[in-house]
Image: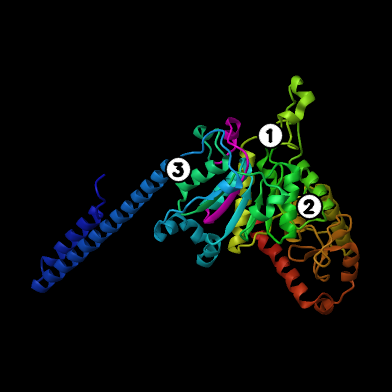
Amino acid sequence: MPPPSAPASTTTALSDLLAQWTESGGVTRKLAVAAALGAVAGVGTLLVVQSLSKRRSIRRLKSQVSEELFATGPSQPGTTATSAQSARSSRTAIPEELIREQLSRNYAFFGEEAMKKVRGSFVVVVGVGGVGSHAAHMLMRSGVERIRVIDFDQVTLSSLNRHAVARHSDVGTPKVSCLAKHCREIAPHVSVEVVMELFNLQSAPRLLAGNPDYVLDCIDNIQTKVELIDYCVKNGIRVLASMGAGAKADPSRIQIADISDTFEDPLARVTRKGLRVKGVEGGVPVVYSTERPGDVKLLPLEEAKVDEATDFAVLPNFRSRILPVLGTLPALFGCTMASYVITELAGYKLDPLAIKLRTKTYEKMLKDIKMQSKARNDDDVKLSVSDVGFILEEIWHGKSAVSGSLDKDKITLTRWNAQRPFEMGNIVCLTRKEAAAHAGLDPAQVAAHYGHDAVRDIERRLQGQVEALKWREP
């Protein structure tokens, strides 16, 4: 490949311009032109040298990574690993300028200090199948420089419809080794610690050692999932859990919510019950889908296998029947988990909107608003059912601004300033009892009644209603 050269058209145009300028000039002007041309040539040479140096660095890096991958080789089919054989892949020392260039879009998004937090973080991903492989893969691409991946299973041909990086040549190898190998090709500076082991409560202190900043639960076995979440909650480790991505197809129904607020998800329901037995009622963010289970069910066992179904499970207490999976959904679950964790690590707080799908509730609330307005001889209510849903769910998160009550049969929307009409910027969510008391307050007493901090927070959210009009109106 020929070396890059300075932009010829720019240099030629400048030379022609300077030549015309010197036609009527003396010796001094000609010397000045010569100096200017020399400076241009020097800058061009410097740019060429810098470009060649960067290309040589990249070629050396590629060669080093390829040699290490070839020397290590993939795990052989049928091999197993114990905890003693678990190992962290060595990082490849590459120039900081190349790392920063690779992460340049993230630096532009988060800024210097936030990216310092992300790059210094340690994340554990338990389960690196369809969901976990995508989560770990995007964490690595986004700047997390220490990741531990835990899984007992191997790549199969059927894994290839949903695994983030696995290829045909990886079939039969441990999922953790497969993921680490391909991650080294993408970000050699990242340390990926592989543990081919089944997570259980007894091994939790060892597998989750090292003070991880986050643990991602991407397990599909209920007992193991409950044990992992329970251990993290009771040991003060931040955890984000994935619920069921199998038998789902609608990407628009994926959302993030506290596990206590989930619905239409069979795995979330069973997990909630298991955690409740252990004393965990909530406080665990999860990625789940509100898509209602349709006609896609567990595949039936062949008649010859029914009497000895447990013999066909991967492990004892694991299901023996196969759940159909559309590969795109686990990928979206994993990317959603990675995005949530990256923003949390960076201090870029998200405020996930929990979609409740309760149109009848919004219609009833709008009817109440119109009745209240009519009692005040104000029939001009410029709100729609969509507006009511937006205000209730996105601004107030479906709960009272004062007490935090989530009971849909008790909460209502009312005017914050009783002297103003029902309009964007003046609608607050309260319980019916709180709304009745609020209606009797003098505006001058509001701060004393609720407290200055509470009033500031409520008025900030009211302002959010007004600002939302800028992008909600057609």
**As rendered, which of 326 and 87 lies closer to the eye?**
87
Which residue of the protein is positioned furthest toward the front in this rendering? 84
Residue at which label 1 appears:
314
Question: What is the secondary structure assignment of the residue under circle 3?
Answer: helix
Query: Distance from label 1 to label 3 (Cα)?
Result: 28 Å
Disc number for residue 155: none
x 81%, y 48%: residue: 274
Q: Is residue 162 magenta?
A: yes
- Asked if labels 1 and 2 touch by Cβ distance under 8 angstroms, the answer is no
Disc nearer the start of the sequence (1/3) = 3
Determine crowd level at label 1: few under 14, some 14-19, many 20+ residues with C-alpha closer than 10 A.
few
- Please state which amino acid type lies under the numbered disc 3: Thr
Q: Quadrant of residue 381?
A: bottom right
Which residue of the protein is positioned furthest toward the top in this rendering? 304
- Please state which amino acid type lies under the numbered disc 1: Val
Residue 93, given in percent of the width and then of the height, sits at: 41, 56
Residue at which label 2 appears:
261
x 52%, y 56%: residue: 145
Q: Quadrant of residue 466?
A: bottom right
Query: Distance from label 2 to label 1 (Cα)?
Result: 31 Å
Disc number for residue 72: 3
Question: Which quadrant does the N terminus fall into?
Answer: top left
Residue 406, given in percent of the width and then of the height, sits at: 83, 58
Disc nearer the start of the sequence (2/1) = 2
- Please state which amino acid type lies under the numbered disc 2: Asp
Residue 397 visible at all? yes
